[in-house]
Amino acid sequence: MNHRERMLAGLPYLANQDGLLESRMAAQELLYTYNNLPPQRWEEQRGLLEQLLGGIGENSTILPPLRCDYGKHIVVGRDVFTNYNLTILDVCQVTIGDRTLIGPNVSIYAAGHPIAPEDRATGWEFGADVHIGKDVWIGGSCVILAGVTIGDGAVVGAGSVVTRDVPPNSIAVGNPARVLREITQADRDHWKKEMER
């Protein structure tokens, strides 16, 4: 396997081999243009996202600035909204499901480095896929680490650091994030009452 294949397979790899540096530079050029377009040129922004990302669904919005490594390893579903200053280190696949909401200053890190300093000094890195389900709400300033899956309908509280999987239809908060509870009918009933006020 070459280093690009190793990276995508979640195996240790060198980030300056087999065209990886060139791929990152191409993504940075697209990002520079995307992040600096005036807001009224939203159709051009959309076109740039379609070039950059591995896929983006209908009616999805990613507010600039956006930062990522490659772009092509990111797949965004439909009706997704991400607020300002999203960072995705997409050395492996990152998927964001339909109707997911992502607050400002969220960081998704599919990348990692060895723990021991002598191993980090060799330049080898690794990654693991990150999967965010449908109908998820990720609060502002969250950090999601490599290998994490966030289940459909989950909520991650603002400022949380997600180091392990979050089950579907649950609320996780904290650093490291822990499951607080499941989302219940009482949550739905409370919202209906608020809407009727």
Image: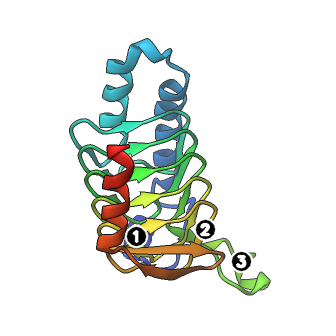
In the rendered view, would you say 121 is above or below 81?
below
Q: CA distance from mark 3 to mark 2?
A: 26 Å
In the rendered view, would you say 118 is above or below 160?
below
Q: How is the image coloured?
A: rainbow
Q: Give the image location of residue 63, x and y in percent.
A: 47, 34
Quadrant the C terminus occupies: top left
Question: Splitting the image into 4 quarters, where does residue 175 fall?
Answer: bottom right
Residue under pointer 1: 2
Q: Earlier in the sequence, mark 3 or mark 2?
A: 3
Q: Earlier in the sequence, mark 1 or mark 2?
A: 1
Can you name the residue that lies furthest to the front here?
A: 197
Q: Is there any visible trace of residue 20 in the rendered image?
A: yes
Can you name the residue that lies furthest to the bottom here?
A: 116
Q: Is there any visible trace of residue 73 in the rendered image?
A: no
Q: CA distance from mark 1 to mark 2?
A: 35 Å
Q: Secondary structure at mark 3?
A: helix
Q: Give the image location of residue 187, x and y in percent.
A: 37, 66
Pointers 3 and 2 in contact (C-beta within 8 Å): no
Amino acid, disc 3: Arg
Residue under pointer 2: 160
Residue drawn where x is 71% and y is 83% of the image: 119
Question: Splitting the image into 4 quarters, where does residue 154 fall?
Answer: bottom left
Residue 120 badge: 3
- For disc 2, the neighbor class at 10 Å (few under 14, some 14 to 19, many from 20) is many
Pointers 1 and 2 in contact (C-beta within 8 Å): no
Q: Earlier in the sequence, mark 3 or mark 1?
A: 1
Residue drawn where x is 48% and y is 55% of the image: 20
Q: CA distance from mark 3 to mark 1?
A: 20 Å
Residue drawn where x is 32% and y is 45% of the image: 196
Amino acid, disc 1: Asn
